[in-house]
Image (tube, rainbow, N blue to C red):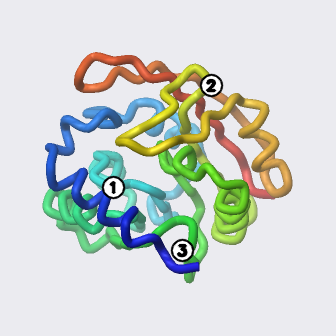
Amino acid sequence: MASDPSLTKHWDERYASVSSEEVSWFQADPQVSLRLIDSLPLAKADPIVDVGGGASLLVDRLCDSGFNDVTVVDLSAQALHESRARVDDPKVEWVVADIRHWQPTRQFALWHDRAALHFLTEAADQAHYWSTASASIVKGGHVIVGVFAQDGPTMCSGLPVHRYDFYELAAAMAADFDVLRTEHEQHVTPSGAVQSFNWILGRRR
């Protein structure tokens, strides 16, 4: 199944119409992501992929920390254009792709995703996501995923989301990953609203 052009258009228009510092998911300092990443035995040359990275500042922080093999994947070329304008670094690969259909050509030591998985509301898309993650992460590698919690928003940027508790997250990854850690986050949006996120850290068996 091909990517949905209307969905691509939706996100490109979203990023073109509002500053990336004003969108609800903006974080000047991605503290939870960095704390979980810092807890892992990663070498600076280990390959990392940020799925749904968009215009997130995580790639900036990773490069500042010395990681030299980072891939950022997003459906929106506009979002990646904004990030690339900030981080003009040959160590970063920018991939415009729909995670529902993306087929990586390499493996990674770390798969990071903040707020992409919860936009997959169909069971088949969710299953494909985890299948792709499993195939894309080296044995002993790690996955970090942050999604809306059950008391989080039911919609984001005009699109429905699938909210998760820790048990559902753990069950979704159970076939190929061991759960190492879970964490709850109260994200404060630029407008001052509070959004509940659940995070999970797993290791590939």
Query: Which residue is pictured at 22% across the width and 57% down the height?
Result: 13
Q: Which sits earlier in the primary sequence, circle 1 or circle 2?
A: 1
Query: Which of the two residues, 191 or 27, is positioned nearer the viewer here?
Result: 191
Indicate the quadrant where residue 179 lies.
top right
**Mark 3 belongs to which amino acid?**
Trp
Secondary structure of the residue carrying numbered label 3: loop
Count neighbours of disc 3 (C-alpha within 10 A) and say few if under 14, some if 14 to 19, many if 20 or more: some
Q: Which sits earlier in the primary sequence, circle 3 or circle 1?
A: 1
Give the left or right position of residue 143, taking residue 21 as reference. right
Secondary structure of the residue carrying numbered label 1: loop
Asked if disc 3 and disc 1 are in contact, CB closer than 8 Å, the reply is: no
**Disc ID at residue 150:** 2
Asked if disc 1 and disc 2 are in contact, CB closer than 8 Å, the reply is: no
For the residues labelled 3 and 1, the Cα–Cα distance comes to 15 Å
Mark 2 vs mark 3: in front: 2
Q: Which sits earlier in the primary sequence, circle 2 or circle 3?
A: 3
| Residue receiving disc 1 | 54
| Residue receiving disc 3 | 102
Residue 139 image offset from top left, x and y in percent: 75, 64
Give the left or right position of residue 81, taking residue 120 as reference. left
**Mark 1 belongs to which amino acid?**
Gly
Residue 130 image offset from top left, x and y in percent: 70, 59
Quick one: quadrant of the N terminus? bottom right
For the residues labelled 2 and 3, the Cα–Cα distance comes to 27 Å
Indicate the quadrant where residue 202 lies.
top right
